[in-house]
Image (cartoon, rainbow, N blue to C red):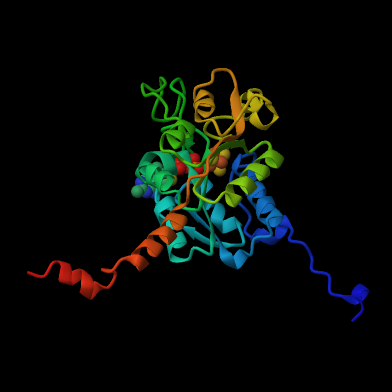
Amino acid sequence: MSSTQEAVVAKAQPSDYKTDLKPVWCAGCGDFGVLNALAQAFAGLELTPERTMVVSGIGCSSRIPGYLKTFGFNSVHGRALPIAIGAKLGNPELTILAAGGDGDGFSIGTGHFPHACRRNIDITYVMMDNNIYGLTKGQLSPTSPSEMITTTSGYGSVETPMNPVGLALGCEATFVARGFSGDIKHLVDIIVQGIRHPGFAFIQVLSPCVTFVGKEQFLTIKNQLHYLDQDPDYDNSDLCNAFRVVNEKGRISVGVIHRSNRPSYHDKMAQLHKAVEKDPHKTLASLMDLYRV
Ligand SMILES: Cc1ncc(C[n+]2csc(CCOP(=O)(O)OP(=O)(O)O)c2C)c(N)n1
Ligand code: SF4
């Protein structure tokens, strides 16, 4: 076969990563942007669908594994992270993403988050933050702004909202980013960087709920965007810089907020295995001898 006759291997296309299922999301929901960004990122990275898995909890956003042509697991409310981590421990060769909403991840699922950060397991967590419980029809979520009127806070909330980025930084996550579902190109870049990051990557995606928060949520976010990658003064390796982004007033910084190079859980396990190899008590029998009376 001459070189001109050689089979041309088609480059992966975003459509290769989408199932035939039509999303049931409301028209205009921010989650459409996240779905498109994920498909584009997967295609750009040429991920093998059979070696890629998307795990979610329960919520409108958590429907996303059903729309992606990778392995998927639509699990239990709040449990995307432990299941994704379990899958990664079971098969470290897989590319694993956990996905879900602010209610899923930062209410019932909060307890899993600090441990994912500190263990630095090599998975990517895409948290679609719409500041509300969408699927269950508009109740207050841990990230709802204090003044927000919801079906369970008719006069606004008396609670201070949780700050997902601040929590991730405080828990020493090695990759912390924020994107907007209304800027898909920018979001694709963040997701690609998150998947490539060798450790736990947390991506908060501002993903409006047009039905229970309102159509204005898109514009409110869009008008305040500040792109960190276009800011020459921003150094994302500096944790103090990153903490400054947490409580900004009047602008919303998007991009990679912080990145550091702590070894991943799997790197540390490999080191541990090496250390055990040198240990004279590495066999169970010799270990039992230590405790024999
Ligand atoms: C253990 C448990 N508690 C509560 C629920 C009810 N429930 C389902 S989805 C959801 C909230 C979803 O909100 P969020 O995670 O923010 O996702 P969204 O629908 O906004 O994308 C709740 C409370 C459930 N399914 N299981
Ligand atoms: S209720 Fe909100 S989050 Fe759920 S599909 Fe509709 S717009 Fe999206």
Q: Is residue 93 left or right of residue 109?
A: right
| Residue pictured at 43% horizontal, 51% vertical | 81
Q: Give the quadrant of the C terminus.
A: bottom left
Q: Residue at x 67, y 26 (%)?
A: 231
Q: What residue do we see at 93% from left, 73% from top?
A: 4
Where ligand 1 lies, by image quadrant?
top left
Answer with left or right where residue 279 lies relative to residue 116: left
> What percent of the width, then of the height, locates residue 82?
39, 54
Residue 134 is at least partly visible in this image? no
Q: Residue furthest bottom?
A: 1
State left or right for residue 47 relative to residue 72.
right
Q: Is residue 188 visible in the rendered structure shown here?
A: yes
Q: Is residue 60 above or below residue 87?
A: above
Placement of the N terminus among the 4 image quadrants: bottom right
Kindly identify the residue that appears in the image at 67 percent across and 32 percent down: 229
Report the front residue among 100 and 179: 179
Expressed as whole percent of the image width and height from the top left, the position of residue 50 reads 59, 67
Quadrant housing residue 288: bottom left
Image x and y of residue 103, in percent: 43, 40
Q: Is residue 5 left or right of residue 142?
A: right
Residue 69, horizontal then vertical, whole percent: 62, 62
Can you name the residue that lies furthest to the top here?
A: 250
Toward the viewer: 102 or 11?
A: 11
Along the line of sight, which residue is nearer the eye, 229 or 185? Answer: 229
Q: Nearer the viewer, residue 288 or 184?
A: 288
Quarter-of-image position of residue 219: top right
Q: Quarter-wise, where is residue 46 in the image? A: bottom right
